[in-house]
């Protein structure tokens, strides 16, 4: 939607505010997930979270699918994206059950850097010297952060790095599906989570939640859905170059909630690594926007 000179700043401010609110919602989703996997299996959390999200998304997706001329874009890639997204979500819930929230989010925020590297290596996209330097700077931040964790929590840290890689591949697949409505992409993603959650529960692990826990498990999906919708709307209110860098407020919220809820305080190596990753990510995004 075009803006005149007077309305553009207001639209930008609204987009920034909505992006910040969406990041807060996603952060609350992460807190709920970490809290719940302490007493429930990952498969159970994933299944109930996906079911709650689908209750909201399914009617919207049905309307989008009934539009004249609708067809599923690149079904094979859609299926690959769904599988990767479900695996990444399961990996995240397992990792936050073993690592402080701020530590886990630091590694996950390296995913945009991985996207740039993977786009060059897998898709042959041209990445100039400055972008490669920023990618390397971000990866140096990962190495700095690893110094704080690897010896004490080796397997969860490796799981976090694997999860970040899966998320990068998920983002890369999503970039190739630009013609698919956002609500359908989100719905397919939740269907994948529902299926993987059910498959994991076939191995056992279901525990009967109390009424309050069931409410939190269902709230998990609703909060994530509102976050997705908020990000989509923010990108319509303001250019991506204005709002996307604010996604790194994830790191701030993860540190705040980790301290308030679990008493976790990131060490200096983790803080330095997070600063390098966030700084490199913001600079890389702005470099990409300039073309």
Image (cartoon, grey):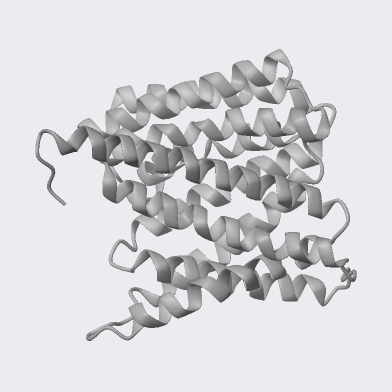
Task: Give residue 39's position: percent from left, percent from top.
Answer: 88, 56
Of residues 81 and 14, the one drawn nearer to the viewer in this rendering: 14
Residue 234 vs residue 91: left or right? left
239 and 197: which is toward the camera: 239
Residue beneath the point at 10% across and 33% down? 5
Picture residue at 73% right of the left edge, 76% below the top: 198
The quarter of the picture where residue 210 lies is bottom right
| In the image, residue 10 above or below residue 212 | above
In front here: 16 or 30? 16
Q: Give residue 121's position: percent from left, percent from top.
A: 40, 44
Q: Quadrant of the C terminus?
A: top left
Using the rendered image of the protein, determine whether residue 77 is visible from the camera's viewpoint. Answer: no
**Eyeballing the image, is 209 above or below 173?**
below
Give x and y (percent) for residue 89: 64, 56
Residue at (53% x, 67% y) in the render? 189
Residue 106 as seen in the image, left or right of residue 38: left
Number of disc labels: 0
Furthest toward the top, the residue is 268
In the image, taking residue 266 as reference, residue 106 lies left or right, namely left
Residue 92 lies, in percent from the top left, at 68, 50
Residue 128 shows in this picture: yes
Rendered residue at 18%/37% (across/down): 8
């Amino acid at each position: 939607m075009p803006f005149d000179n007077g309305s553009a700043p207001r639209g930008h401010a609204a987009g920034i505010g909505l992006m910040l609110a969406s990041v807060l919602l996603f952060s609350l989703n992460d807190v709920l997930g970490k809290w719940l996997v302490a007493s429930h299996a990952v498969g159970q959390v994933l299944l109930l979270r996906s079911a709650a999200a689908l209750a909201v998304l399914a009617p919207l997706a049905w309307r989008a699918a009934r539009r004249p001329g609708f067809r599923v874009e690149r079904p094979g890639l859609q299926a690959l994206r769904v599988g990767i997204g479900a695996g990444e979500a399961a990996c995240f819930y397992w990792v936050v059950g073993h690592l402080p929230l701020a530590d886990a989010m630091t590694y996950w925020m390296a995913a945009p850097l991985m996207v740039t590297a993977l786009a060059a290596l897998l898709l042959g996209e041209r990445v100039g010297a400055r972008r490669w330097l920023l990618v390397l700077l971000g990866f140096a931040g990962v190495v700095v952060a690893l110094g704080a964790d690897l010896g004490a929590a080796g397997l969860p840290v490796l799981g976090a790095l694997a999860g970040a890689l899966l998320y990068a591949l998920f983002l890369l697949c999503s970039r190739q599906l630009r013609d698919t409505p956002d609500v359908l992409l989100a719905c397919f993603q939740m269907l994948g989570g529902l299926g993987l959650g059910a498959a994991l529960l076939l191995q056992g692990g279901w525990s009967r939640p109390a009424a309050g826990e069931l409410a939190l498990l269902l709230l998990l999906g609703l909060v994530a859905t509102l976050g997705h919708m908020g990000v989509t709307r923010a990108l319509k209110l303001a250019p991506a170059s204005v709002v996307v860098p604010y996604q790194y407020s994830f790191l701030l919220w993860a540190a705040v909630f980790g301290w308030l809820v679990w008493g976790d305080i990131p060490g200096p190596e983790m803080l330095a690594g997070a600063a390098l990753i966030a700084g490199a990510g913001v600079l890389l995004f702005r470099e990409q926007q300039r073309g």
